Amino acid sequence: MIRTSGLCKTYGRITAVDSITLHVPPGIICGLVGPDGAGKTTLMRMLCNLLEPDRGKIEISSVILGYMPQRFSLYGDLTIMENINFIGALYNLDKKTITARADEILSLTGLNDFKSRLAANLSGGMKQKLALTCALITRPELLILDEPTYGVDPESRQEFWKILYQLNKQGMTILISTPYMDEAELCHLVNFINQGRITVTGTPLQLRQQFPHQVLKVEADSHDPHLLSGIEGILDISFYGSYYRLVTDAAEKASRAVKEHCRARGINNLTIKPVPPTMEDVFVLLAEKEETAWKMPLQPKD
């Protein structure tokens, strides 16, 4: 569906995309994750032919492509239906076709009862559904979404992903960038991009299995986020209000050190147990440029 090789884009001295080779097989939801400024938007804009690469190749199967940019870019002083009619007309669709497709898509996105509402008066989640509706009006076979749920409440994000799964079930290929690791877990394939390069590619399961460290969950009678700071052998600590997550290379040694550390502070009631790594653990590790600790990047099969 999508293949790139040696794709590059620079802005002056800044290299936004650096020799990216990407393969998105047909019929999957493919995730693109990475820190801010990693090159996700630049890559997507080149794939949509909105930016010209400095060098490299892009091959996209001859399909209809739908694109939803990061920022809401429709007209606030037009209603939902007026925005859809306008976008449909830009693609030379006749009024009858636009109306028929709009009814179908609005039913899917749950916006049927709001056709006459001004876009400016929609909630964040509804604006994103409207943007998705407009991206779908051409019935694309390939849908490219740039952080479509950023800043949207959790319930709306969940509804949005239900729609994406329905579209994918119908055969649509989806490339989506996201800052949320729970959304990365929902993708069939994930590409991690950092400093303009794709460093690791694999399924969420493969990426978690390749995580080169061990993770411990610690529950203690303390709400001090700094309680476990300074313990030797702990690579990273995250505090979640009722428990701590520790990343280490020696789980048994770290467990003993945590117990001794807590007892010295009068905390004897604690539970320590190993837990599987999450995509958030993977993200933090790769964002800190530890890709050298990983096996060779995985490549999707045709």
Image: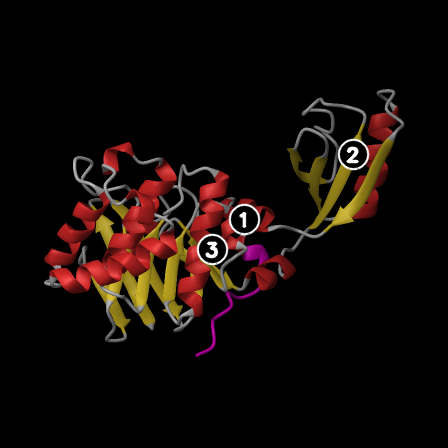
> Considering depth in this image, is 279 or 10 the residue closer to the camera?
279
Position of residue 15 relative to residue 96, above or below, is: above
User: In this orientation, does residue 10 appear?
Assistant: yes
Residue 90, quarter of the rendered image: bottom left
Where is 256 relative to 210, above or below? above
Q: Earlier in the sequence, mark 1 or mark 2?
A: 1
* Circles 3 and 1: CB atoms closer than 8 Å: no
Q: Earlier in the sequence, mark 2 or mark 3?
A: 3
User: Residue type at mark 2?
Assistant: Glu
Say what amino acid the circle numbered 3 marks: Lys
| Residue 219 tag number | 2
Residue 77 colored magenta? Answer: no
| Residue at 11 percent of width and 57 percent of height | 89
What residue type is disc 1 on?
Asp
Closer to the eye: label 3 or 1: 3
Q: Dot 3 lies on which element?
A: helix
Q: Which residue is mark 3?
A: 162
Q: Which residues are magenta?
A: 292-302
Task: For the C terminus, give its image quadrant.
Answer: bottom left
Q: Marks 1/2: CA distance?
A: 23 Å
Q: Is residue 300 left or right of residue 80?
A: right
Circle 3 crowding by C-alpha within 10 Å: few under 14, some 14–19, many from 20: some
Labelled pair 1, 2 in contact (Cβ < 8 Å):
no
- Quadrant placement of the N terminus: bottom left
Q: Is residue 53 visible?
A: no
Q: Earlier in the sequence, mark 3 or mark 1?
A: 3
